[in-house]
Image: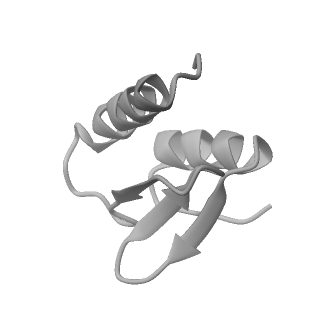
Amino acid sequence: MAKYTTCKDMDGVVTALVKKGWVFSRNTHGRVTHPSGKYITFSMTPSDSYAYRQLERDVKRLLKQIGEAS
């Protein structure tokens, strides 16, 4: 299993998204792209204790924009 980020909670979120068909790519930050083409960028080595919650919030926000249920 690939390790997407150093935060285990964020890694679990990204792993679940990839299993649902999202695409992970890496540059200076991580990026998960929805099959529709919309994407979320996140830190691969988060120093912010709220990074996990922000990633979850961003995923929910993107799914709401697309019209999918989370």
In the foreground, 20 or 12? 20
- Where 6 sits versus 18, above or below? below
Whole-percent x, y for residue 65 in the image: 40, 29
Q: In this view, does 23 lie to the left or right of 59?
A: right
Q: Residue, x 58% and y 22% (percent of image)? A: 68
- Where 67 sits versus 53, above or below? above
In the foreground, 59 or 64? 64
Whole-percent x, y for residue 70 in the image: 57, 19
Q: Point out the image quarter for the N terminus.
A: bottom right
Q: Is residue 66 left or right of residue 46?
A: right
- Where 31 sits versus 27, above or below? above
Identify the residue at the far bottom of this view: 27
Q: Residue, x 57% and y 63% (percent of image)? A: 4
Q: Residue, x 78% and y 45% (percent of image)? A: 19
Q: Residue, x 76% and y 40% (percent of image)? A: 20
Whole-percent x, y for residue 14 in the image: 58, 48
- Numbered-mark total: 0
In the foreground, 24 or 6? 24
Colour scheme: one colour
Whole-percent x, y for residue 55 in the image: 37, 40
**Quarter-wise, where is residue 27 in the image?**
bottom left
**Quarter-wise, where is residue 46 in the image?**
bottom left
